[in-house]
């Protein structure tokens, strides 16, 4: 007699067959096609607060707010998009999407964030179909017809990827459009490759899918060069789970293996070309650190730490930050880096030891390291030591393993090797993980709501970030509040990193605003001594030198700005300032040329119109002078000085009634205190 309440193994098999029969037929197809829209819905819900977020002063200002070049999809904008290395990246397709956003939304942040969110949701869908093709390849036997476990497992893998808080930075940061866009085409390229390798008859269909993969891979690289590692990922997949390169390393050089290798050559050529372009873009931006600045031991320690960091944050996604800063006192022999090295070594050995029983573990580990390779610091650029956004593609393998775990659990239950209670507990745990990730993501998205909240959060994670102190101070200054607190943060940034040139410059800006000219000049000088390429520091220092009557020195700094590549606003401001200094020296023709250059860059520059009018009037070109005075007033009607200058020019032409009206308007504005200075 069997124990009460415990079914015999034969009964469990019977129950398994019954479940399979019930779930066969139309139900799996329905599940298969309902899961992608459900995944999109859950992804959008988890990231929904992003639609209330603003742009942040973490490249968004330079990329979007202060950059007019991408605004539109005309020939001028497209030409710029496909030829620029602006901000150290070659990303023409990402610029195209920004141009489309501008046409739809102008400068409304909601639209830009919505596009990022929809792209991320699309990535979840494509990854679902990738998982749907990869997961059955790891099964010990063929998938059971009509079994819904496979689409459910693929959906679970897609949600682990899409809802994880490590994805927030790439989605909530408008500038990082390149992450979600390039990843969409990267995943699509893998899907095309899987479809191509699944074709058993008909070379034409196989070629079609392979060429399709090559096309979308090109689109990925045109969005961002992070996908250069795809050929290596495809080779790993050929070993397992595709098993196209089977039989061990000794058979990897046979005729069939060579054929498989040759099909990767077009992908490899694209990767090399775009990899070189990416390095050139970083070099032009001055972002790459040389070996004399940052040695091989330090880069190796950073790489090991990064491998351990993203794995740890995948398991415990808490206290995420927009910036994990590379500190100036970084010591590669400190305990976190030694421990990271041990963790990486131990995990590598473990995965190698169990590779025969669990090849998926080793493949996931290898793909993880390979996908991280370009961002581990071997070619170090920027202030970050690690970054959440670098996990966007690299952690896909762990999501696949999560889906595989659910799939195998379902198989064990169906075959009678797992009790129903255990199975329900496991599925409940999987659902709880998805829910927890969604809640954490909802909260993390709100960290990116605005610049002040972002950097206060970063400082809550770590007080020892000079860039976070500097960026928070920039927010306080830009909003025109708490200047004293801003100065404290600038000084704290310099205490952490005395060689932080931008912090010296920013502190100088606040000191100049407070009228502490001598100290401001000193800070500008220190900034330029550390980094002579800071165009803003040259421009600001030149402005103060003009006020002190040191015109020759000021002109030297303004000319230096024009030799440097900087944002349009700085270039136009420097042309204007150079024109002002030259006019004071009596070089009116050259001054006029620089005022005109400033207006070419910024046609709405009211002060430049006014000062060009003054120079024109001094050269007896009254008609042109009046034209520029009127233009200044069209831009800024409450510009008292422009009313006064226009009145004087009109009086010289004998138009006394109109001149009187402008004199009266100038007096009214000055008495009201509304417009003594122009908007520059």
Image (tube, helix red, strand yellow):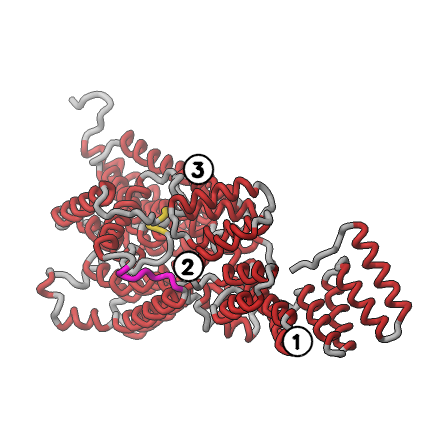
* Residue indicated by mark 2: 529
**x%, y% of residue 379?**
29, 60
Query: From mark 3 to mark 1, how far is it between C-alphas?
Result: 64 Å
Q: Is residue 336 left or right of residue 81?
A: left
Which comes before the other along the chain, label 2 or label 3? Answer: 3
Q: In the current view of this chain or complex, which residue is farthest to the front?
A: 549
Give the label, 3 or 1, closer to the camera. 1
The kind of secondary structure element at disc 3 is helix
Q: Quadrant of residue 66?
A: bottom right
| Residue at figure coordinates x 53%, y 45% from the top left | 450
Compare residues 277 and 158 and report the one nearer the observer: 277
Whether 238 is drawn above or below 26: the answer is below
The kind of secondary structure element at disc 1 is helix
**x%, y% of residue 33?**
42, 52
**x%, y% of residue 547?**
61, 59
Compare residues 84 and 165 and report the one nearer the observer: 84
Q: In the current view of this chain or complex, which residue is farthest to the left?
A: 250
Magenta residues span 286-292
Query: From mark 2 to mark 1, how far is it between C-alphas?
Result: 32 Å
Q: Quadrant of residue 160?
A: top left
* Residue indicated by mark 3: 439
Residue 588 marker: 1
Q: Is residue 253 left or right of residue 659?
A: left
């Amino acid at each position: 007699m069997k124990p009460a309440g415990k079914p015999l193994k034969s009964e469990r098999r019977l129950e398994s067959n019954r479940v399979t029969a019930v779930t066969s037929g139309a139900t799996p197809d329905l599940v298969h096609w309902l899961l992608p829209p459900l995944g999109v819905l859950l992804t959008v819900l988890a990231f929904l607060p992003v639609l209330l977020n603003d742009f942040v002063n973490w490249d968004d200002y330079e990329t979007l707010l202060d950059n007019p070049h991408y605004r539109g999809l005309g020939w001028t904008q497209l030409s710029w998009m496909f030829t620029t290395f602006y901000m150290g990246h070659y990303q023409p397709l990402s610029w195209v999407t920004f141009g489309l956003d501008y046409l739809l939304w102008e400068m409304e942040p909601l639209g830009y964030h919505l596009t990022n969110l929809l792209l991320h949701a699309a990535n979840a869908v494509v990854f679902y179909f990738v998982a749907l093709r990869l997961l059955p390849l790891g099964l010990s036997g063929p998938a059971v017809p009509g079994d819904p476990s496979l689409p459910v497992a693929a959906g679970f893998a897609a949600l682990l990827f899409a809802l994880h808080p490590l994805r927030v930075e790439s989605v909530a940061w408008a500038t990082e459009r390149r992450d979600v866009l390039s990843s969409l085409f990267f995943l699509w390229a893998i899907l095309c490759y899987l479809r191509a390798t699944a074709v058993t008859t008909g070379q034409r269909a196989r070629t079609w899918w392979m060429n399709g993969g090559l096309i979308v891979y090109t689109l990925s690289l045109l969005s961002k060069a992070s996908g250069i590692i795809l050929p290596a990922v495809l080779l790993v997949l050929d070993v397992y789970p595709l098993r196209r390169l089977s039989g061990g390393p000794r058979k990897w050089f046979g005729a069939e293996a060579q054929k498989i290798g040759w099909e990767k050559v077009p992908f490899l050529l694209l990767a090399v070309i775009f990899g070189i372009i990416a390095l050139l873009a970083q070099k032009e931006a001055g972002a790459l650190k040389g070996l004399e600045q940052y040695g091989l031991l330090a880069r190796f320690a950073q790489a090991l730490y990064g491998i351990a960091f993203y794995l740890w944050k995948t398991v415990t996604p808490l206290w995420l930050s927009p910036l994990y800063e590379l500190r100036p006192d970084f010591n590669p022999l400190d305990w976190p880096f030694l421990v990271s090295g041990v963790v990486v070594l131990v995990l590598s050995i473990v995965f190698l030891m169990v590779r025969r029983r669990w090849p998926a573990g080793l493949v996931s580990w290898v793909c993880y390291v390979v996908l991280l390779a370009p961002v581990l610091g071997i070619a170090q650029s920027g202030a970050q030591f690690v970054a959440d956004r670098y996990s966007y593609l690299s952690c896909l393998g762990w999501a696949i393993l999560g889906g595989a775990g659910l799939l195998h659990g379902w198989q064990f239950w169906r075959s009678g090797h797992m009790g129903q209670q255990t199975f329900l507990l496991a599925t409940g745990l999987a659902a709880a993980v998805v829910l927890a990730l969604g809640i954490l993501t909802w909260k993390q998205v709100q960290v990116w709501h605005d610049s002040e909240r972002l950097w206060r959060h970063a400082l809550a994670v770590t007080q020892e970030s000079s860039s976070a102190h500097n960026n928070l101070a920039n927010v306080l200054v830009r909003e025109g509040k708490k200047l004293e607190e801003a100065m404290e943060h600038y000084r704290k940034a310099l205490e952490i990193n005395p060689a932080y040139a931008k912090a010296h410059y920013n502190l100088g800006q606040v000191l100049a605003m407070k009228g502490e000219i001598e100290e401001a000049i000193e800070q500008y000088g220190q900034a330029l001594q550390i980094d002579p390429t800071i165009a803003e520091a040259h421009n600001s220092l030149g402005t103060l030198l003009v006020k002190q009557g040191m015109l020759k020195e000021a002109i030297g700094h303004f000319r230096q700005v024009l030799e440097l590549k900087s944002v349009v606003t700085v270039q136009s401001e420097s042309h204007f300032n150079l024109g002002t200094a030259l006019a004071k020296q009596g070089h009116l023709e050259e001054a006029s040329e620089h005022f005109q250059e400033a207006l070419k860059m910024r046609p709405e520059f009211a002060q430049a119109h006014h000062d060009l009018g003054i120079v024109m009037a001094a050269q007896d070109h009254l008609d042109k002078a009046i034209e520029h005075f009127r233009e200044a007033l069209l831009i800024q009607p409450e510009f008292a000085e422009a009313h006064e200058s226009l009145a004087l020019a009109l009086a010289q032409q004998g138009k006394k009634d109109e001149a009187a009206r402008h004199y009266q308007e100038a007096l009214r504005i000055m008495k009201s205190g509304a417009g003594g200075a122009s908007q520059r």
